[in-house]
């Protein structure tokens, strides 16, 4: 056990154990859990809409939806939430749906923190870990410094790396602290982890080149901070990102693929980035980004963005559509 009920709850869901939302439901992640018998599911509003329950989603104001049916056993439920089945599944049998109740939104958020599909069984309390809705909804706004050391890099000023542990799920985020800031707001890049692009050089995105250029620009500036945030796939996790890639191979764009999985276009929360910057004394920054959501996210958490610095990479034949979707549907700008 840790000193964080939310972190314990995340680990429990990942291991297929039940979690009780205080004042709300007790859930078992559909992806990892093995209920004694089938029952009622909680689905994110986005996944409910993808299943043709859009009218129910609108009636519920975007809140989670509860779904039940006589035919909904464990195997059928897993097929129901697997977006790969959407293209071959016939008409759904009769479903009973109702608006989510107290704590259901926190349940979906907890599944997201665990990197799991946004679907869970309602189960009886039993012996379950527990966390409060309030703690879950604000969990990504606390960090703990766990290590810091010098990290010499070729062609760069004196550089250190600091590791911060996320209060929500125990993920370890890295801060690359380069040189001296010279009395002005530091140049800062918020870079979300991208294993496929950063490590393997995938051409489906522009993440790898962005990371390299950001480090080079901070070095040329003489100092700044690069945060390497464990927010793979815009916050949906590595497995779900690969599921989204498979949907993109079927013709969906990034936004529609995320929605079919049951997620928002962008699930990232910049509270953890703001908490790290504050811990490093960077309360005002020059932000290297073309994503206005990052500017708004930092400022909402009390970090002032003195200047937005353009950061754009040239397209390649494999990511041209992806980059155009970022501008057309996700609000990215190119100036």
Image (cartoon, rainbow, N blue to C red):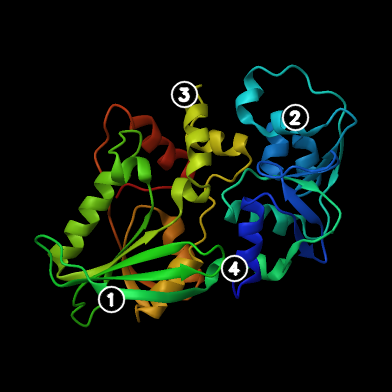
In space, the residues marked 1 and 4 are separated at their CA atoms by 27 Å
Say which element carries label 1: loop
Q: Is tag 3's residue or tag 4's residue first in the polypeptide sequence?
A: 4
In space, the residues marked 2 and 3 are separated at their CA atoms by 25 Å
The disc placed on residue 75 is 2
Please indicate whether residue 20 sits to the left or right of residue 190 in the image. right
Question: Which residue does the numbered mark 1 point to in the structure image?
Answer: 185
Task: Let me know if residue 114 appears in the view.
Answer: yes
Q: Is tag 1's residue or tag 4's residue first in the polypeptide sequence?
A: 4
Task: Let me know if residue 62 appears in the view.
Answer: no
Q: Determine which quarter of the picture holds residue 127.
A: bottom right
Say which element carries label 4: helix
Q: Residue at x 46, y 69 (%)?
A: 165
- How crowded pointer 1 is (Cα within 10 Å; few <14, some 14-19, many 20+) is rated as some
Question: Which residue does the numbered mark 3 point to in the structure image?
Answer: 249
Residue 283 location (% of width, % of height): 38, 79
Say which element carries label 3: loop
């Amino acid at each position: 056990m840790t000193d964080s009920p939310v972190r314990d709850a995340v680990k429990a869901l990942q291991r297929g154990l039940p979690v009780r939302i205080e004042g709300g439901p007790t859930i078992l992640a559909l992806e990892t859990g093995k209920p004694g018998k089938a029952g009622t599911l909680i689905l994110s509003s986005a996944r409910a809409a993808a299943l043709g329950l859009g009218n129910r989603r609108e009636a519920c104001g975007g809140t989670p939806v509860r779904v039940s049916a006589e035919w909904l056993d464990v195997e059928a439920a897993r097929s129901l939430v697997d977006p790969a089945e959407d293209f071959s599944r016939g008409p759904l049998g009769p479903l009973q749906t109702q608006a989510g109740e107290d704590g259901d939104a926190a349940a979906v958020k907890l599944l997201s923190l665990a990197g799991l599909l946004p679907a869970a069984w309602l189960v009886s309390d039993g012996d379950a870990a527990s966390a409060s809705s309030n703690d879950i909804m604000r969990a990504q706004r606390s960090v703990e410094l766990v290590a810091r050391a010098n990290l010499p890099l070729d062609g760069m000023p004196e550089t250190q790396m600091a590791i911060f542990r996320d209060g929500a799920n125990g993920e370890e985020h890295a801060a690359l602290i380069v040189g001296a800031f010279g009395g002005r707001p530091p140049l800062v890049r918020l870079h979300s982890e991208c294993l496929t692009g950063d490590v393997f050089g995938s051409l489906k995105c522009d993440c790898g080149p962005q990371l390299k250029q950001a480090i080079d620009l901070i070095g040329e500036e003489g100092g700044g901070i690069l945060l390497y945030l464990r927010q793979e796939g815009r916050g949906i996790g590595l497995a779900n990102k690969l599921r989204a890639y498979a949907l993109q191979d079927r013709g969906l764009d990034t936004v529609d693929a995320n929605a079919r999985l049951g997620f928002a276009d962008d699930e990232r929360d910049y509270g953890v980035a703001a908490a790290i910057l504050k811990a490093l004394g960077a309360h005002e920054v020059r932000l290297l980004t073309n994503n206005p959501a990052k500017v708004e996210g930092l400022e909402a958490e009390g970090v002032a963005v003195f200047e937005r610095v353009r950061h754009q990479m040239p397209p390649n034949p494999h990511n041209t559509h992806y980059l155009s979707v970022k501008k057309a549907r996700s609000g990215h700008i190119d100036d």
